[in-house]
Amino acid sequence: MLFARVVATSAEVGATRSRKAKTAALAAVLADAAPGEVAPVTAWLAGFMRQGRTGIGWRTLSGVEVSPADEPSLSVPDVEAALDRLAALAGSGTGVGARRSAELSALLGAATADEGRFLVRLLGGELRQGALEGLMVEAVAAAAEVPADVVRRAFMLSGQLPETAWTALGSEDPVAALEAVGLEVMRPVRPMLASPGDSLEDTLADLGSEIVVEHKLDGARIQVHRRGDEVRVWSRTLHEITDAVPEIVALTRELPVDTVVLDGETLAVAEDGRPRAFQESMKGLGNGAMQPWYFDCLHRDGRDLVDEPLETRRRELAEIVGDRVIPSVLRPTPERAAEAIREALAAGQEGSMVKALDSTYTAGRRGKAWQKIKPSHTFDLVVLACEWGSGRRRGWLSNIHLGARTDDGFVMVGKTFKGMTDETLRWQTETFPQYETSRDASTVYLRPEIVVEIELDGVQTSTRYPGGVALRFARVVRYRDDKPLAETDTLDTLRALRR
């Protein structure tokens, strides 16, 4: 398959607002891809490279001056091989920069203008918005003519979308092949997420009385695997952090199991036992100061539990980790549930989780089996740009432009400079230029990679911003190094709060 077909499909998807049309376009190119092409095509159209980081920044990309090819000639295998070579040159050293520039020049010189623009955005990280992940799952299902839930489950258990697509499209019996994908100890599972709850009353109306109310810890999500004496730990984004948390590794080796997969949080704790701020928990990774708490068990001694109800998984969890289960109240009355939420806030936590006891473990934020209750509205948005400050903030990057996720990427929904400390301003000024795509006299425009948690009082309809909404009294809570772009909040979520 010519690489130009992938680039044209990306443009076609970006040109329509119809989810059905997007899915059809993606499915068509996947169906036509050869078996060896499915995985890279899936990755590129979802906005990322299978090779991960290549060490190529915008300075390197902008320094390449080559004339584009007149006609498309690059194939999908050609481009994937070139990306493999570039990834092998990641890092620094004598001659590495020159070889990387030469390899990049050869690739871009063989690309047409449209292909070159796509490659620059792919290499520069500008396509890495994750917004197409859900669409790609549906497209894989359509191309393979299998139910989307079967693809979704295999993706959850494998953690890899390109490999899931290859399994679906490269098998004579795709349903059987996808259903054969199981949980593997030492291979991370995509995490289940909670949906925002409008209020405790609404959440109880959704879920009924067969629930558990847990503290929502202001920590870092962890997934812990053990097999014998081997222990590995992954972050929310499935990046391995084992070496950074030796205390968790040591505690896990003491558990009364041979194999286990646990889902939980780790956080830094002050001398009085209260949790430290989220940023301190993130900084604590690697200094031996972290304490783990768990809320789910996905596997125990050869038995997978993802399809068991939460009540069963919690029972197994309690037998394994004892008092390391996150504080919770089982089957509370409405009054006791409200009290449990007050207790969580009084303990310094950011709110509570309300979970249906009959819910199975399902990756992502699908349905409302898990809901989070917080005292105010908070959303995870993406920084699209930042304006230089004035007055006391002159010389600092201050007012951030906020973007919400859509199927096509991110759309601006507001600005804010509220809630920023001098340390925040200093960090923004030092960090944001690393993500710069362009600037003018007042604003630095950024690749959509930086996630920020925003607290706000509400949302109102507005024509001021492209998203058609405006955020009321938006203020910065924290930057979320742990939150992938695919898990940021959507424009539809914000619109649901409009007054």
Image (cartoon, helix red, strand yellow):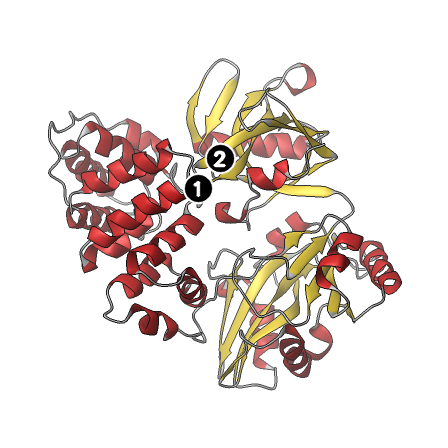
**Residue 99 visible in the current orientation:** no
Label 2 crowding class (10 Å Cα cut-off): few <14, some 14-19, many 20+? many
Q: Secondary structure at mark 2?
A: strand
Classify residue 151 by image quadrant.
bottom left
Question: 104 left or right of 55?
Answer: left
Residue drawn at (68%, 71%), measured in percent from left and top? 357
The quarter of the rendered structure image containing the C terminus is top right
Viewer-closest of 76 and 28: 28
Please give the label number shown on residue 303.
none
When the figure is inspected, residue 424 is found, relative to residue 173, above or below; the finding is above
Residue drawn at (65%, 20%), measured in percent from left and top? 393
Contact (Cβ within 8 Å) of mark 2 with mark 1: yes
Q: What residue did someone put label 2 on?
A: 410
For the residue marked with disc 1, what is the amino acid? Gln
Question: 268 left or right of 413?
Answer: right
When the figure is inspected, residue 448 is found, relative to residue 329, above or below; the finding is above
Residue 31 percent across, percent down from the top left = 24, 54
Residue drawn at (32%, 59%), measured in percent from left and top? 165
Of labels 2 and 1, earlier in sequence is 1
Residue 245 percent across, percent down from the top left = 56, 64
**Residue 339 visible in the current orientation:** yes
Q: Secondary structure at mark 1?
A: loop
For the residue marked with disc 2, what is the amino acid? Phe
Gap between marks 2 and 1 measured at Cα: 8 Å
Q: What residue did someone put label 1 on?
A: 129
